[in-house]
Image: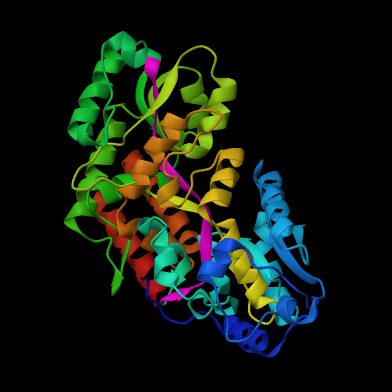
Amino acid sequence: MKKFLSLTLVLALILAISVGCSSSSGQSSQQASPAANAEASTAESSAAETTGEKVVLDMLWFADGAETEAMKHIIEDYKAINPNVQINLLEVPYDEITNKIMMSVVGGEPPALARTTESVLSAVYDATLDLREYVDDIDGVLAQFMPSIYNYFIINDKVTALPTDVTANGMIYNKTAFDKAGVKVPTSPDDVWTWDEFVAALEKVMADGGVQYGMVIDNPSHRWSSILYQFGGKFMGEDGPAFNSPETLEALKFTKELFDKEIVPKSTWLGGEDPNNMFRSGQVAVHLSGNWMMTNYRDNIKDFEWGVTYMPKQKNRSSTPGGKQLAAFKGSGVEKEAVDFILFATSQEENAKYCVESLFLSPRLDNAKLDYPFGSEFFEIFSNELENTVDAASFDWGFPNFSGVARTPQNEGMYELIAGNITPEQHIANMEEVLQELYQ
């Protein structure tokens, strides 16, 4: 699991206050859910078990789409089993969620629960409960989830949350263009192309498939990092920055060659042209993006058939995961009930319903194949990409402040590299300086 130095003095203050303060959320009785009965325990009985009064749990929540309704359905399922537990879903814009959690904790009224991302958790993890202290068989619970995302919610061996959904980078392709060029994409993990084979296929589709470009890549940081991991590189290591490596150099040279050969259009990184729009227009054979594009392309692509195929490999297979979690907080006064709800919401059955309704990927290994109303075969491929993702991917993007500190210089450096203003070696040196400062 990820190890790193302590966070800011502000978070130390949060920790101190959160330990000493508890909210008056109400104390009440609860019939524990079946999943929680099997997995959760605390040193003391919950308020719900001892007083018979209603327990109120406030959950800070942000949303991008249909997941709010999906979570409301989980809350309804939970309340049917636990009629004395009331869960208030308090919607907050994503860009305010971290500050809202911090201020609530400092003010002595921490929320019972919050929806988080890896960047949010890296900022507030001192204030979260350690689920190891509340779940008897925590290792058994963790074994149900994809190991490639552990670093997003296990910090200094502290289990700060459990995941509700994940995202995966992957390859969306213009099936009409590939069919016209007579190129068949890999249909099994056993048939994954190498990058050389993939480039050869793109060149044939460009020549014979009626498209102008071979591929577009969403951005030169998160989406490009999948190429970095496939070549065996990474940004950070347990002992400090690790970007300066032969593998990173090879990945950078390979990427520049894709642009120099005009397989990837420079206008997407240097001219502000939208990769999504270019793919939707039918000009491009492949879009390196992610599973979040499924609904968009289902609704907006009418002129050609598209699909999802496996990403190429070099030294490794790898995607770059993202996703969301549910965390519980110290000092809420309803800690046990909060943990019980997390276990319920992330159980196989409830999580499956949540992900199907939201068109999300499940983080659970036993939910790799779900019956989605659209694109089940596509989600299965994305899920397989995550199952074969290297640990470095979540270590990097879950490292405290990595996204906020490293993303901008990585983007800007890649722009300069593609424009020919700096060499791959210069970009590595510049990023090593940024990453060293971040590590310290």
120 with respect to 197 (left or right): right
Pick the quarter of the image with the C terminus.
bottom left
User: From the viewer's perspective, is residue 185 above or below residue 315?
Assistant: above
Whole-percent x, y for residue 24 in the image: 80, 80
Magenta range is: 157-175
What residue is at 66 percent from the left and 57 percent from the top? 95
What residue is at 63 percent from the left and 80 percent from the top? 330
Q: Nearer the viewer, residue 44 or 229?
A: 44
What residue is at 36 percent from the left and 14 percent from the top? 177
Using the rendered view, name the quadrant where residue 289 is placed: top left
94 with respect to 273 (left or right): right
Pick the quarter of the image with the N terminus.
bottom left
User: From the viewer's perspective, is residue 9 above or below residue 210?
Assistant: below
Whole-percent x, y for residue 293 in the image: 52, 34
Q: Main secondary structure of the magenta part?
A: strand
Whole-percent x, y for residue 261 in the image: 26, 28
424 with respect to 103 (left or right): left
416 with respect to 282 (left or right): left
What residue is at 61 percent from the left and 68 percent from the top? 340
Query: What colour scheme governs how the chains and residues are painted in the rendered image of this protein?
Result: rainbow
Using the rendered view, name the quadrant where residue 237 is placed: bottom left
Q: Is residue 120 visible?
A: no
Q: Nearer the viewer, residue 380 or 149?
A: 380
User: From the viewer's perspective, is residue 250 above or below residue 40?
Assistant: above
Assess whether residue 150 is covered by the magenta stretch: no
Whole-percent x, y for residue 48 in the image: 74, 76
Q: Is residue 42 visible?
A: yes
